[in-house]
Amino acid sequence: MRKHEPISLIAVGDICPGDHNCMGFGTGTLMKSHGHKFAFQHVADLLRQGDIVFGNCEGVISNIGRDDGNIDTLEFRGLPAFANALHSCGFTVMTVANNHVGEHGPEALRDTVNNLRSAGMDVIGLRDNTRTSMPLIQEIKGVRIGWLAYTWIASKHSNQDRSVLSWTKGDEIPNEVAALRPEVDFLIVTAHWGREFVAVPTQRIIDHAHAIADAGADLVLGHHPHVLQGTERRGKCLIVYSLGNFLFDEWQSWLRETALFRCSIEDGRVQASEFVPLKINRNFQPMRAKKAQAARILRNIEQSTRAINDPELACLRDEARAERLEAKFKRRIFRSQILFLAANVGRMGPRTAYQKLCRRMPALQRWI
């Protein structure tokens, strides 16, 4: 590995460009009202410090198929200008390997990729005829940085996602990592995986991460659980199991606690890695967490890291336990959503609130 200047890498988790939980007053609506730079105004200076800035585009950036009277066409959807906002605040690489970018069909998915690329970002997470994940190779400060991106989860258009996105069950990834390894100086793998809302990854996910590391990855960046998870060193590879939410219209406080991950790439290794604690405020903007909240966020990451690395805590990595926890959190969120709808019908509008309610109570007649 030749000597080079340190390369600063910043990574964040799930970025939802449109409304989801808060239809009519969520991230997409606020950005439409205040401009798309509004979303990142508290963290843009942080993001711009990175030579590489990575995020997970957890939604559609396209007007194709949009119908303002039908929430089925609006959820997880941002305006095309959002791609320019991402680039202007520092993002350089976006993955579309997730279960929401295909939410509105193949044309909107393709348009999303085109909009991201036209704004000046590299897009990863697509497949071709010979590989699950098409690799990206960048040259930064004379260093060849390789990327592979995968998702274990598909959208409601699962056949579409499995034919276009780098959907996987994980078995072929080590071979693809090993094939790319000789072509690059530093190799990053991103993974959309795991149980939602669960702070400790399961042993199955850990085994996948170990196989990726053993095949030659230098850094693994995970997302999908919507909460932060801990880290692990495997040889020279650093595994970050979940980056949590970054831009999402969540109202529960525990889902608005998150962090930005940053590190330095030096001599082919991850150095000086750290989490910068963030909170998502009431306008759904990420911003630096205050002292007490920041301490709690870092403590939670440390606890998750201990559960990942301590053999005596293997019970916390059990698949059945994680499945029960995920179901428990989803039931809790489901119950709170009914109350949330009732409390916010004025902000949401009766039409949108009714359509939302129909999602939870299918026996109701749809009003579209």
Image (cartoon, rainbow, N blue to C red):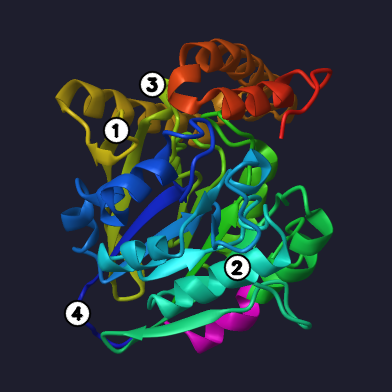
SS for dot 2: loop
Amino acid type of disc 3?
Ser
Residue 346, x across and y down, in percent: 45, 19
* Callout 1 amino acid: Lys
Q: Amino acid at mark 2?
A: Gly
Side of 37 relative to 316 (left or right): left
Task: Between residue 20 and residue 343, name the one nearer to us.
Answer: 343
Residue 147 in view, yes or no: no
The residue under the point 43% across, 58% down is: 55
Crowd band around label 4 with a 10 angstrom C-alpha radius: few (<14), some (14–19), many (20+): few
- The residue beneath circle 4 is 5
Which percent across, then down, holds residue 292? 19, 21
Mark 1 or 2 closer to N-term? 2
Percent position (x, y) of residue 284?
34, 36
For the residues labelled 2 and 3, the Cα–Cα distance comes to: 30 Å
Number of residues whose C-alpha sits closer than 10 Å to that of mark 1, classed few (under 14), some (14–19) or many (20 or more): many
Indicate which disc, 4 or 1, sits on the residue closer to the N terminus: 4
Query: In the rendered image, which residue does mark 3 sit on?
Result: 253
Q: Quadrant of the N terminus?
A: bottom left
Main secondary structure type of the part rendered in magenta: helix
Q: Which mark is residue 279?
A: 1
Specify the amino acid type for callout 4.
Glu
Residue 345 visible somewhere in the drawing: yes
**Region rendered in magenta:** 177-185
> Where residue 125 is drawn, which disc sits there?
2
